[in-house]
Amino acid sequence: MQSPLTQSYYLVLQKKLNLALGQEGKIQLAAKWIAESLQNQGWIYAIGTGHSHILAEEIFYRAGGFARVRPIFAPKLMLHIDATGSTEAERQEGLAKKYLGNYSLSNKDIFILASNSGRNPVPIDLALEASKAGAKTICITNISHSKSVNSRHSSEKKLFEVCELAFDNFGEIGDASITLEGFNSKMGATSTIIGSAILNTIMLEAASIIINSGHNPEIFHSSNTDLGEKHNIGIIKKYKNLVKGL
């Protein structure tokens, strides 16, 4: 039997998942953009700051994931080298060109950003630069949180205001969702779980569009199955020199 805390967290996640996946119109539009991009030999770029970088990893080299994904792993924006430093790094304006310097974005591409607060300069600058290059920009963010704080960008804009398509993860302000009795701080973050569900739903819908158009999407299988290992060899050989980190 589930404990009251486990049940509370489950119910919170269930409610937020229902709300997030209820963004049906946006999901279908994002899927259409991605299907068109892949069919035109475009790329799916993905980046996140802080814990949100996990969403870029979620769709990269993933069993059941598209092959034409270029994640942008910027160590200074991630947690594995300097976690507290990453908090400061994403607040620095004007660094987007540095992070995009090795990539040639075009109007064939999709640029996916994840930032829970959506208030910091780096994600906003990245979205603006990607848009200038012609890529379609999609973000996953917490719109309630964004609206509750001031932007740290000189434009005074938030991420959801500068992207063509903004998905709400319906998180709590501050992300953590569960109050423990006798304790002042909340626990139980929801942004990663909800963000991953949004992304995987979009990718499923995009694959369906491609298949219904009479084509087979290039999708990785699990490398931990014998058949998957054999299947992936050809994809890896094709894209190894085109995808940094593959």
Image (cartoon, rainbow, N blue to C red):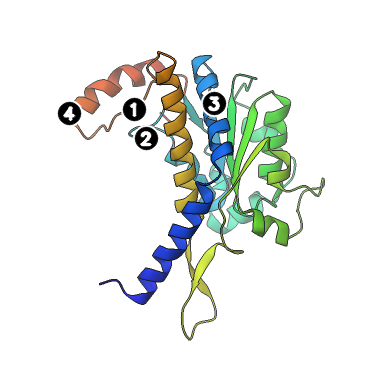
Question: Which element carries disc 3, helix, strand or loop?
Answer: helix
Q: Do the residues labelled 4 and 3 touch (CB within 8 Å)?
A: no
Question: Which element carries disc 4, helix, strand or loop?
Answer: helix
Q: Vertical placement of 174 versus 167: above or below?
A: below
Residue 113, x across and y down, in percent: 59, 40
Q: From mark 3 to mark 1, how far is it between C-alphas?
A: 20 Å
Q: At x 52% / y 66%, what residue is drawn?
A: 176
Q: Which of marks 4 and 1 is nearer the N terminus?
A: 1
Q: At x 52% / y 45%, what residue is drawn?
A: 53
**Could you tell whether 65 is left or right of 126 in the image?**
left
Q: Which of marks 4 and 3 is nearer the N terminus?
A: 3
Residue 48, x across and y down, in percent: 56, 44
Residue 80 appears in the figure: no
Per the image, the residue denoted by label 3 is 32
Q: Badge 3: few (under 14), some or many (20 or more) residues near its Cα, within 10 Å?
A: some
Q: Do the residues labelled 1 and 2 touch (CB within 8 Å)?
A: yes
Name the disc covering residue 62, or none.
Answer: 2
Mark closer to the observer (3, 1): 3
Mark closer to the observer (3, 2): 3
Q: From mark 2 to mark 4, how far is it between C-alphas?
A: 16 Å
Q: From mark 3 to mark 2, how far is it between C-alphas?
A: 20 Å
**Could you tell whether 214 is left or right of 83 in the image?**
left
Q: Badge 4: few (under 14), some or many (20 or more) residues near its Cα, within 10 Å?
A: few
